[in-house]
C-alpha cells in the first residue's frame, strides 16, 4: 500500500481550510535568519540578526534552544508539499533555501575550528552532549540546555524532510539538505564509537534519534548511520514490551513514544530483523490505548504515564490542568499510521480518526493559529495557546508539523484500488490515474457524497475500484453506486465497490458514554468520531497558570457546577439534538441541577468546557463535606526535566528512579537536592511530603526557608506510600533543601 501524497489533495472542509491557512500565515511570518541566531553563535560566526527568538529558544537561562528551527524545517517543507498556491510555495521554498544554505555554511565553519567534530550542527555547544554522557565541563563552559539529543533529532529530521519533499522539485536544495544531514550522521557515528556508557546517555530524553538515523540510512546507504541508530535503541525496554509488560508508569510519555517509532524503523531497515521490534511497538500501542488513553485519543498527566486505568484519578484527583500533552498525540498518530501500514489492522485507522479530530484539530486556535500544550480533560477549564514569538513550546513545534500535513492519511492505494480513510470534505486529483474525485460530507459524517470523473474525458480512469473505510462508530452502513444501493456488513473494514460516477455513503453515528476504568460515573460523551464537550461560559478566558519551563496552562473555576445530577440510571436517552448557529452540531441534557449543552470539543475555543463530568443520580450523589487544605503548589513528577527545573532544581550526588509506578528523587550519601518554588499565589503554612514504605523508620533532614526540620518516616507497614505533614511559619515564598537517604515522591504546599 502507498499513502496518497498531500499535494494531490485539496481540502474543502471549511474548518480544515482555515486551520491550514492559519498555519501558512504563521510559517511565513518568521524571520528565518533570526531562527538560526544561536547556531551562528556556536560556530563563532557573526549572525545576520542582532538577536534570536526567545522563550524555549533563549540561551541565557534553562532552555531547549534549537528545537523549533528543526520543527520549522519540517513544517515548511510539509506545507510546501501540501499547498497548491504557487505564490505560497515560492515563499516557503525561498525560506528553506536560505535556512539550509546558512546551516551548511555554519556546519563548515564549525568544522574549520573544530576539525575533530566535523559535521556537528547545533544551537548549543558539545558540552551539552558531554554532560548527558557524564563528562563534566568547566564551569565557564557548562551548558544550560536540558535535552540535547531531543533537540538534535528535530534538526536532523527537519533536514531529511526538506531532502525528501524537494526531490525532483529543487534538486540542489534537496541534495544540500541530505549532504548536511549525512555529515551530521557521520559526526554522531564517531561520537557513538567512543561512548563509554550508553545507558547513562539514554537516561535523558533523546526524542526520535534512532528513528531519524535509520531514516538517514535509507537515503545515505551508509551502514555507519544504521549502527549509530542502534545506540539509541533501548533493547531491554523493547523486550519488556514485546512480552506484553506494562512498564509505563512513571515514564515520561513523549520520551517513550518516539522510541517505538525507532523500533519500527529498526525493524524496517535491518536485514533479517528480529520480530521483537515490531511486537514491542504493537504491544506498546495496545497498552497505551487500552489503559492510558482518554476519549480524545490523548494520554498522560503532567507529561507522564501513571498507573494503568487510573484516568479519573489523573484528570480529577491529581492536578487536572496538565492532562494530554499534545506532542504525545502527534507522535502517537505517527506510530499509528506506520503500524497500520505494517499490519493492516483497522483499529489503527479508527484511533487515527478519533485522535486527529479531537486532539490535533482541537489544539489549534482557529482565530490565531496558535497551539495548546496540555489539554485538560476535566470540566471547568479554558484552553491556553502559545504566544507566537516568545514561547516556542515543544507542542508549538509538533503543532506546526501536524497542521502542515492535515490530509496525509486521507487516502492510500494498492494497485488499482483507491482506499478512502477520512471523510472530511476534500478534492482528490490523481493525474497519473486520470481521476478527479470530489468528496463532500455533512456535519456529523452520516452522509457522504462522492463524484468521480476523468480529468481527460478522452482517456480511461485507471483506478478500477474504490474502498471506503467502515468506521467502528457506525451502527449500520449503506452505499449507493449510480443509484444502486446495498446494505453493508459492519464486520468488514472496508466497502469495496467498482468505480462509479456518483456514490452516496450513509453511516449511523450514535451517542455513547465512555466512562473511565476507575470510576464508572466519570466519563465523556461521544457522537460518531466526535468527542463532545459541555459549554461552561466565557469567564476569565485569558487566565492561565505557570507550569514547567515557561509553559502556561488552563485554569479551573472551582465555583462552576461541573457534576451533573441525572434523574435516572439510563440518562443517556434524555440527551436530545438541538440547533446551533455557532457549532456544527449540539445536544442538550436537562439534568436535575442544570441544563447542559454539548458541542464538538474540537470546535470550542472561546468558552470554558467540560469533556469529562461526574454523572450522578440523586441516590449516589456524594456531597463534599468540610473544607480541605488548599494545595497552593506541588511537585509530584520527578523527571530531571521540565517539572523539576521549573521549581529551580539544584543537586549534588542525587538521582531519580521509579517505584510502584511513581518517580522519586533521592540524594546519595553526602548528597543533597533543593527546589525553589519562588513567590506563591497564596501563603502556605503546611508542607506535605510523600514517602515510600521502604523508608519506614528513617529520618529525613531538610531545610525550609533556612529553617531546619527533621521528619521521621512513620506509618502502617501496609501503606505503600506514606504522607507526612509539617507545619511551617506562614510564607509567601518557599525553598526546600533535602538531605540524603530518603526518597521524595511528592511535595505539596498547603494553605
Image: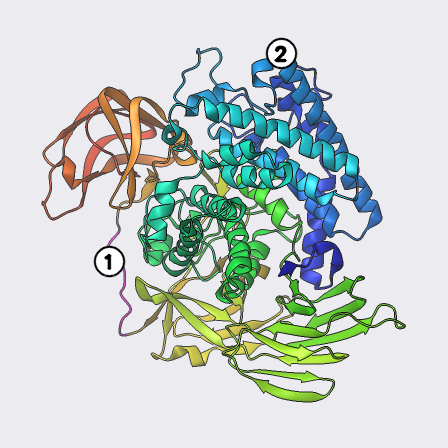
Taking the view exactly as shown, the residue that stands out farthest to the front is: 272
Taking the view exactly as shown, the residue that stands out farthest to the right is: 458
Q: Compared with residue 672, is residue 156 higher up or lower down, i.e. above or below?
A: below
Q: Is residue 174 visible?
A: yes
Q: Quadrant of the C terminus?
A: top left
Q: Compared with residue 95, is residue 36 higher up or lower down, i.e. above or below?
A: above
Q: Residues within 10 Å of mark 2 (few under 14, many from 20)?
A: few
Q: Quadrant of residue 736?
A: top left
Q: Is residue 551 left or right of residue 387?
A: left
The one nearer the camera, 244 or 393, is: 244
User: SS for tag 1?
Assistant: loop
Rendered location of residue 240, percent (x, y): 33, 48
Tell me how far mark 1 sits from mark 2, CA to CA: 69 Å
Question: Which one is earlier in the sequence, the residue at label 1 or at label 2?
Answer: 2
Q: Is residue 626 magenta?
A: yes
Q: Quadrant of the N terminus?
A: bottom right
Q: Is residue 440 left or right of residue 511?
A: right
Q: Compared with residue 189, is residue 165 higher up or lower down, i.e. above or below?
A: below
Residue corresponding to mark 2: 113
Q: Quadrant of residue 698?
A: top left
The one nearer the camera, 1 or 307, is: 1
What's the magenta region? 619-627
Residue corresponding to mark 1: 625
Q: Taken as a whole, is the magenta stretch helix, strand or loop?
A: loop
Amino acid at each position: 500500500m502507498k499513502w496518497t501524497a498531500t499535494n494531490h489533495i485539496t481540502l474543502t472542509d471549511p474548518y480544515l481550510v482555515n486551520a491550514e491557512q492559519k498555519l501558512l500565515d504563521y510559517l511565513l511570518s518568521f524571520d528565518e535568519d533570526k531562527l538560526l541566531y544561536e547556531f551562528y553563535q556556536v560556530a563563532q560566526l557573526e549572525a545576520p540578526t542582532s538577536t534570536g527568538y526567545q522563550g524555549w529558544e533563549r540561551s541565557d537561562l534553562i532552555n531547549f534552544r534549537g528545537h523549533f528551527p528543526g520543527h520549522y524545517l519540517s513544517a515548511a517543507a510539509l506545507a510546501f508539499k501540501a499547498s497548491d498556491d504557487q505564490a505560497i510555495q515560492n515563499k516557503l521554498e525561498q525560506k528553506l533555501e536560505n535556512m539550509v544554505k546558512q546551516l551548511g555554511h555554519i556546519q563548515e565553519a564549525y568544522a574549520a575550528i573544530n576539525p575533530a567534530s566535523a559535521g556537528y550542527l547545533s544551537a548549543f555547544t558539545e558540552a551539552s552532549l558531554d554532560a548527558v554522557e557524564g563528562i563534566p565541563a568547566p564551569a565557564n563552559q557548562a551548558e544550560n540546555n536540558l535535552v540535547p539529543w531531543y533537540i538534535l533529532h528535530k534538526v536532523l529530521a527537519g533536514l531529511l524532510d526538506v531532502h525528501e519533499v524537494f526531490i525532483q522539485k529543487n534538486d540542489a536544495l534537496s541534495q544540500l539538505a541530505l549532504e548536511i544531514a549525512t555529515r551530521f550522521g557521520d559526526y554522531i557515528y564517531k561520537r557513538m564509537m567512543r561512548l563509554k556508557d550508553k545507558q547513562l546517555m539514554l537516561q535523558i530524553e533523546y526524542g526520535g534519534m534512532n528513528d531519524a538515523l535509520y531514516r538517514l540510512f535509507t537515503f545515505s546507504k551508509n551502514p555507519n548511520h544504521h549502527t549509530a541508530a542502534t545506540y539509541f535503541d533501548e533493547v531491554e525496554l523493547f523486550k519488556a514490551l514485546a512480552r506484553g509488560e506494562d512498564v509505563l508508569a512513571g515514564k515520561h510519555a513523549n520520551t517513550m513514544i518516539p522510541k517505538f517509532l525507532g523500533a519500527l524503523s529498526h525493524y524496517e531497515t535491518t536485514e533479517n530483523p528480529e520480530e521483537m521490534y515490531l511486537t514491542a511497538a504493537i504491544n506498546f500501542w495496545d497498552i497505551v490505548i487500552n489503559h492510558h488513553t482518554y476519549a480524545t485519543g490523548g494520554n498522560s498527566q503532567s507529561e507522564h504515564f501513571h498507573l494503568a486505568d487510573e484516568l479519573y484519578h489523573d484528570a480529577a484527583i491529581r492536578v487536572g490542568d496538565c492532562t494530554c500533552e499534545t506532542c504525545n498525540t502527534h507522535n502517537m498518530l505517527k506510530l499509528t499510521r506506520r503500524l497500520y501500514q505494517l499490519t493492516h489492522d483497522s483499529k489503527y485507522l479508527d484511533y487515527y480518526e478519533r485522535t486527529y479530530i479531537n486532539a490535533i484539530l482541537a489544539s489549534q486556535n482557529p482565530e490565531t493559529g496558535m497551539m495548546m500544550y496540555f489539554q485538560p480533560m476535566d470540566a471547568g477549564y479554558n484552553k491556553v495557546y502559545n504566544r507566537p514569538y516568545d514561547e516556542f513550546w515543544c507542542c508549538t513545534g509538533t503543532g506546526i508539523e501536524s497542521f502542515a500535513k492535515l490530509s496525509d492519511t486521507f487516502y492510500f492505494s494498492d494497485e488499482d484500488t483507491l482506499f478512502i480513510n477520512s471523510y472530511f470534505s476534500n478534492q482528490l486529483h490523481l493525474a497519473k490515474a486520470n481521476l478527479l474525485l470530489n468528496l463532500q460530507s455533512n456535519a456529523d459524517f452520516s452522509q457522504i457524497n462522492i463524484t468521480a470523473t476523468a480529468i481527460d474525458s478522452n482517456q480511461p480512469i485507471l483506478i478500477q475500484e474504490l474502498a471506503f473505510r467502515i468506521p467502528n462508530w457506525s451502527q449500520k452502513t449503506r452505499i449507493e453506486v449510480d443509484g444502486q444501493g446495498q446494505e453493508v456488513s459492519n464486520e468488514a473494514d472496508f466497502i469495496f465497490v467498482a468505480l462509479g460516477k456518483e456514490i452516496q455513503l450513509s453511516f449511523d453515528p450514535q451517542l455513547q458514554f465512555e466512562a473511565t476504568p476507575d470510576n464508572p460515573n466519570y466519563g465523556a460523551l461521544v457522537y460518531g468520531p466526535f468527542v463532545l464537550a459541555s459549554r461552561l461560559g466565557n469567564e476569565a478566558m485569558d487566565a492561565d497558570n505557570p507550569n514547567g519551563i515557561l509553559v502556561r496552562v488552563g485554569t479551573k473555576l472551582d465555583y462552576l457546577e461541573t457534576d451533573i445530577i441525572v434523574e435516572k440510571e439510563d440518562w443517556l436517552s434524555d440527551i436530545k439534538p438541538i440547533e446551533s448557529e455557532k457549532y456544527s452540531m449540539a445536544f442538550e441534557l436537562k439534568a436535575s441541577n442544570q441544563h447542559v449543552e454539548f458541542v464538538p470539543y474540537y470546535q470550542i475555543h472561546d468558552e470554558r468546557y467540560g469533556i469529562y463530568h461526574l454523572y450522578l443520580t440523586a441516590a449516589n450523589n456524594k456531597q463534599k463535606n468540610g473544607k480541605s487544605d488548599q494545595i497552593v503548589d506541588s511537585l509530584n513528577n520527578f523527571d530531571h526535566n521540565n517539572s523539576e527545573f521549573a521549581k529551580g532544581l539544584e543537586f549534588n550526588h542525587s538521582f531519580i528512579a521509579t517505584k510502584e509506578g511513581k518517580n522519586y528523587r533521592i540524594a546519595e550519601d553526602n548528597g543533597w537536592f533543593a527546589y525553589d518554588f519562588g513567590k506563591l499565589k497564596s501563603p502556605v503554612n503546611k508542607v506535605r511530603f510523600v514517602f515510600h514504605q521502604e523508608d519506614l523508620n528513617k529520618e529525613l533532614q531538610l531545610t525550609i526557608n533556612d529553617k531546619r526540620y527533621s521528619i521521621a518516616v512513620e506509618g502502617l507497614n501496609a501503606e505503600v506510600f506514606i504522607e507526612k505533614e509539617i507545619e511551617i511559619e506562614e510564607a509567601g515564598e518557599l525553598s526546600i533543601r533535602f538531605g540524603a537517604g530518603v526518597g521524595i515522591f511528592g511535595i505539596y504546599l498547603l494553605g
